[in-house]
Image (tube, coloured by chain):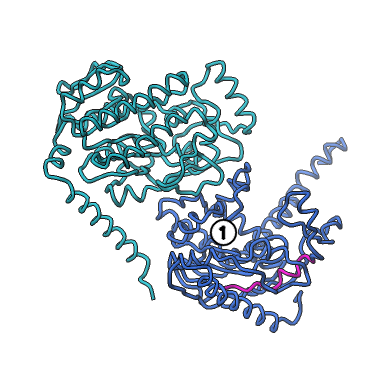
Chain colours: A cyan, B blue
Amino acid sequence: MQEPPDNDDERRQRDRRQQARRAIDHLPVDVIERIETGPVMITGIVGRLGRRLARQLHRSRAVIGLDRRPFPDRPKDIEHHEIDIRRNKAKDIFRSKRLAALVHLGTMHDPTRTAEEQQTWNVLGFQKLLEYVRLYDVPKLVLLSSASLYGARPDNAQFLGEDAPLLGAGAFSEMRHLVEVDMLAQSFFWKHPKTETVILRPAHILGTVHNAPSNYLRLRVVPTLLGYDPMVQVVHQDDVVRAIQLALRPGVRGIFNIAGPPALPLSRGLRMLGRKSVPLPYPLAKAGIDRLWRAKMTGFPAPELDFIRYVCMADDRRAREQLGYQPQIDLEHTLASVDEGEWG
Amino acid sequence: MRKRFALSRLADVAANDMLPRAQRLLLGARQSLADYGRELVGEDFEERTRLLRQRYERQGGDPFGLDPETAKYLIIACSFFHRKYFRTEVHGLETLPEGRVLIVANHSGQLPLDGAIIGSALFLDLHPPRIIRAMVEKWAHSLPFVSTFFSRVGQVVGVPENARRLLELEETLLVFPEGTRGISKPFNQRYQLSEFGLGFMRLAIETNTPIVPVGVIGAEEQYINLGNVQWMARALKMPVFPLVPQWFIPGAQLPLPTKYRLYFGEPMRFDGDADDDDAVIEEKVWVVRQTIQSLLHRGLRERKSIFF
């Protein structure tokens, strides 16, 4: 006779906690200290997520920002460098500071930029950063990737684990460079075990951020697809910030899906937000959005329709068990956060 | 007072005499429809739906998109077939264990009505009620409306990860290990089990789930399949093309009103290694298959008539 299942789960959790402890035991004391107290570099700090992370971190430790945009209203103790990550000047900062960690939020998601710019910024820029991390032995690297990279497909399992293939670029080739960035981090993880590499793949991040899901929910009249109502996962920006902070602890490494409150049908989310929605037949919606996209009248490329058509949900059990992550913000507040102001 | 114009007299009659009568008639019809509905689904139907809703609300909603309020309507539609059309007899449902269960049944009848009837029995004849979860072909989930409908009534995309997850959520999962081989059996092979797949056994061992074997009697005779036309199936790119004469007679598309009998067996537990060799798993599958075969034999022995 086998043990009842809940004991089984408990045992698995206990094993994982022990594993995590052992991971710290292997680290030299000075490395642990460096990770815990050293300065953290945040790329893309001027973005809305970057600012929130900086506000959480700067009271307890030094924060260095790296962004080509200016950061005028930053707290006094944050050191900000207004440079392009592709420039060699970035290297000097790595050389002069004994960084505890690099948090890479500076991936370009804006689909209206040219493919070439996105490609060189994301792939070449990140490759340079990886080189500096290796050269100056930065002990921690955190990349904010995305669960959308798994792709929304009709034959997806309801919950995709971290080992699911990144098929998002199959139907949406503009996503290719984001997949490449994730892959670069994965190979870095194996090639340079001295650096603790963490890849976070959050579900649709909602909040004051300007990403596709938040912008979609901010539309006054929300188009949906006739006959499709997939389950969607959303996560509040502050829960993502919390996950990044957890990933910065010594001993944490690997890929983690990050999800928020329980998943819900898209239609229910729109009802909870009180949005008016217009269901359109898919071929019509696709043709319409293609037109608008070519006329540069919309920020949504047509392949993104798949995310309101098919399911793309991440299994966040690993984050809950190994990272100790637990979403704090409930569904209503997560959804409502798209309407909040800048610092709401 | 007598009205002068014929039309106004007519209006008078309509307002004072016919309208109340029509209202009474409508009310009566609605009442009898409600009575009929109650008779079909049972007095405690709303209570059953409420129990299920509570169960999923406690979890923060079913992550696969099941909505008991939508599933309710499908159950009402199925209950007509369950209670009136096939007049299902259910045996051995009381031994169904609590928590996660893998229901393994013989598959028959050209159209998967056997699944619908097992689902109705678990909702209407069991306390507390359960919603059966089954796996649906992947392509069905790419179709508009169909995909949403399936997901609201609890049917999920047919990939192994989903089956595992459902059992971990303590759901009741229905599998037909015979697959299309079973459902499209020609009439001369009725109640002879075809080959079983091995996946369900590995799943049960891995998730430590009891298997409940079910023998379904009555579905084999609902459509008479004279044989599968292979070249037709190839030409139409369908898995099989059953030759059912009934389907070519206009108005005779409904199944024959056979009497369904469901025989639920005792729960069976298996342990060992889920990744064992096929030969080892096959032995365990054989035990389940024999149990279902003997349930079928028992049912056929007890049956006096196909239709009553």
Say which residue appears at 57% left-offset and 24% top-offset. Answer: A289
Q: Is residue A154 left or right of residue A323?
A: right
Q: Nearer the viewer, residue A80 or B73?
A: A80
Q: Amino acid at mark 1?
A: Ala
In the displayed structure, does residue B102 sit left or right of residue B147?
A: left
Find residue A238 and report its horizontal and vertical position in percent.
30, 35
Q: Is residue A333 visible?
A: no
Reply above or below: B22 against A96. Answer: below
Q: Residue at x 60, y 29 (%)?
A: A285
- Magenta stretch encompasses residue B223: yes
Vertically, is B248 above or below B89? Answer: above
Question: x, y percentage for residue A234?
Answer: 41, 39
Q: Chain of mark 1?
A: B
Q: Is residue B284 visible?
A: yes
Instruction: Give coordinates of residue A77: x percent, y percent.
Output: 15, 23
**Magenta stretch holds residue B36:** no
Q: Could you classify mark 1 by the number of other residues whose Cα lies within 10 Å: few (under 14), some (14-19), or many (20 or more)?
A: many
Q: Is residue B87 left or right of residue A216?
A: right
Residue under circle 1? B134
Residue range of the region highlighted in magenta in the rendering: B213-224
Q: Which corner quadrant holds the N terminus of chain A?
A: bottom left
Q: Quadrant of the C terminus of chain A?
A: top left
Name which quarter of the figure residue A48 lies in. Answer: top left
The foreground one among B90 and B108 is B108
Q: Position of residue A170 (x, y in %)?
A: 53, 35
